Image: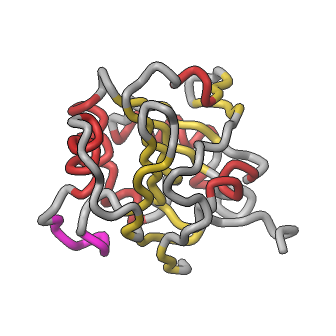
Amino acid sequence: MVLLKSEVVLKAGDKAPDFNLLGIDDRKHSLSEFKDYSVLLVVFMCNHCPYVQAKVTAMNEIYERFKDRIAMIGINSNDPTNYPDDSFGNMKKFAKEKGIKFTYLVDETQDVAKKYGAVCTPDPFLFNKDQVLVFHGRIDNGMKPEDKATEKTMILNVERLLAGKKIEKDFDPSMGCSIKWKSQQT
């Protein structure tokens, strides 16, 4: 396991890069189908990472709390060749076991992760109703899997966004396992 902090590639004010990815519902999903929501939250995640596993409950809470106003999308960009726990079949199993109701997609080519500048899991990106980045960073302030969060950073930022208030910091790095890139990547 390589531990990384998220990095700034996509900057506040940038539009969300488009995608056309297969979901665990066996349908293709593109960014345009989420255009009518007040908030878009894209989280690069996987199944095997202990940091993701520690945040699933918090991610489910975000979705349940704002589900009528938020489009929440999990994207797994890990190479399942060396990490079979992150295979498409295991994504379906993981989602069922963890009660994930938000959209969960596979980024087989890893191109979407590269466009967003995602480097770790989880790596969340929060966009406004125009799909413009307003916050890139942590779900909460529990930075290690065993940490108990004392601040629900993403919930607070979604509430601010929905209330038309400015988000104080546009970047507050998340921490997690590195995305498992395909071996041919330089």
- The residue drawn where x is 51% and y is 77% is 4
> Outermost residue, left direction?
150
Q: Is residue 145 magenta?
A: yes
In the image, residue 114 sits, relative to residue 32, either above or below, namely: below
Q: Which percent across, then down, holds residue 139? A: 32, 57
Residue toward you, 98 or 115: 115
In the image, residue 64 sits, relative to residue 174, either above or below, namely: above
Dominant secondary structure of the magenta stretch? loop
> Outermost residue, right direction?
184
- The residue drawn where x is 74% and y is 58% is 81
The answer to whether residue 126 is left or right of residue 80 is left
- The residue drawn where x is 52% and y is 23% is 35
Q: Which percent across, then down, holds residue 112? A: 69, 48
In the image, residue 29 sits, relative to residue 113, either above or below, namely: above
Q: Is residue 43 magenta?
A: no
The answer to whether residue 175 is left or right of residue 163 is right
Residue toward you, 121 or 153: 153
Identify the colour scheme used.
secondary structure
The quarter of the picture where residue 83 lies is: bottom right
Residue toward you, 166 or 45: 166
Q: Which percent across, then down, holds residue 16? A: 59, 43
Q: Magenta region: which residues?
A: 142-149
- The residue drawn where x is 47% and y is 63% is 49
In the image, residue 163 sits, relative to residue 48, either above or below, namely: above
Image quadrant for the N terminus?
A: bottom right
Q: Which percent across, then down, holds residue 15? A: 59, 43
